[in-house]
Image (cartoon, rainbow, N blue to C red):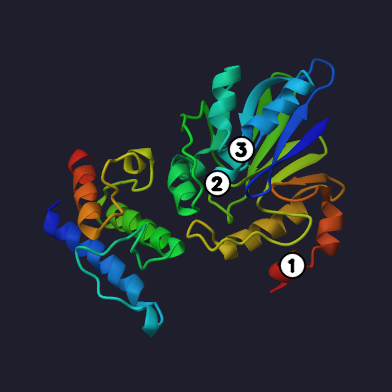
Amino acid sequence: MIIRIVNEPFSSNAYLLCRESDSKCIIIDPGLDEVLVDQKIIELKLKPIAIISTHGHFDHVGGVSFFHDKYSIPFYLHIEDLKLYKSSNFYLKLSKINRFIKIIEPEFLMIGKSQKLNIDKFSLEIYNYPGHTKGSCIIKHENNIFTGDIVFKKGLYLNKLPQENAAVLKKSIIEIMNAFDLASNCYPGHGNEAVLNEIKLTNQDLINFISN
Amino acid sequence: MEKKKITEIVTSTVCSLVETLPAEQKFIVDQNTILFGTGSKIDSLSLVSIIVDLEGVFSSDYGIDISLTDDRAMMRKKSPFDSITALVDYIEELTLEN
């Protein structure tokens, strides 16, 4: 079961990847609405066992320390986004958001292009697809892929920050469309979920971006 | 690294940014130029570019890895982005530790 919780102020998606048999869950991309996410965890009597972020932008890592401390669970992040994560408070200030988040040292730094992670009984595959940020990853679990800010049902998320590289992003998106089963359920960092093939065929901004 | 050299690198990086601005937005860069906050003529994206460029120059040209935007920078009583002088002071502090 996958539960989406929309975090404000950037409408970023936090996900709870849950196993119904024992209520264990992995928190993916806890943003700045950690209380809202935690309310859902409490309401569903879930037992968080890990936190993974698809990338290091503050709207996807803002709640990490809250869950890390409350549930004593490890945090996974790709090493290429560590510096970005540690700059979260700078970017919050730049975005005129009056928050100061606690930065923790991730227990696990993912490295390289791909990695298999077995967390409890969750078998995950992590793939680094740079472009949006250097350490942006897709998290695959069964037929579901969490695509962060790389692939969306509608539109693209170009922010013009120096960490973004449009040419590399384009290459990554093309690779993703070829690498994953097009029947995969895609859970993006913003907006609604969709089947990957639907995105490939109907996301006109994405089609234009990779065609030019 | 000498403070004079750091000042030269920082000033030149900010000047390069100013050169890319439209004529009506250009301004004279000096030691008191505010990089961020009230009175700054530099927008957020440009500030990020300056920082990324500076970190890149210190790393690639001088082999010194610095981070100008982590919590150490953000929690300083005097922000490194208050002025070019403040940023130079902070970078000097970091380079001395490196």
Helix, strand or loop status at disc 3: loop
Asked if residue A96 is positioned above or below residue A118 in the image, the reply reads below
x 68%, y 24%: residue: A118
Find the residue positioned furthest to the bottom.
Answer: B23
How far, Cα to Cα, is label 1 from label 2?
22 Å
Q: From the viewer's perspective, is residue A182 above or below residue B44?
A: above
Give, as a three-letter code, the residue at label 3: Ser
Looking at the rendered structure, the kind of residue marked 1 is Asp
**Dot 1, crowdedness within 10 Å: few (<14), some or many (≥20)?**
some
Estimate the x, y position of residue A95 in percent, counting from the top left.
50, 53
Where residue A12 appears, as percent x and y from the top left, is: 67, 46
In percent of width and height, residue B68 lies at 34, 48
Query: Mark 2: which secondary structure?
Result: loop
Q: Residue at x 86, y 56 (%)?
A: A198
For label 1, the residue is: A205
Question: Which of marks 2 and 1 precedes in the sequence?
Answer: 2
Tag 3 subunit: A
Counting labels gives: 3
Circles 2 and 3 on the same subunit: yes
Q: Which residue is mark 2?
A: A57
Work out whether mark 1 precedes mark 3 in sequence or the reverse, and give the earlier one.
3
Quarter of the view holding residue A50: top right
Closer mark to the observer between disc 2 and disc 3: 2
Give the residue pinned by disc 3: A53
> In the rendered image, is residue A27 in sight?
no
Image position of B83 with respect to B23: above or below: above
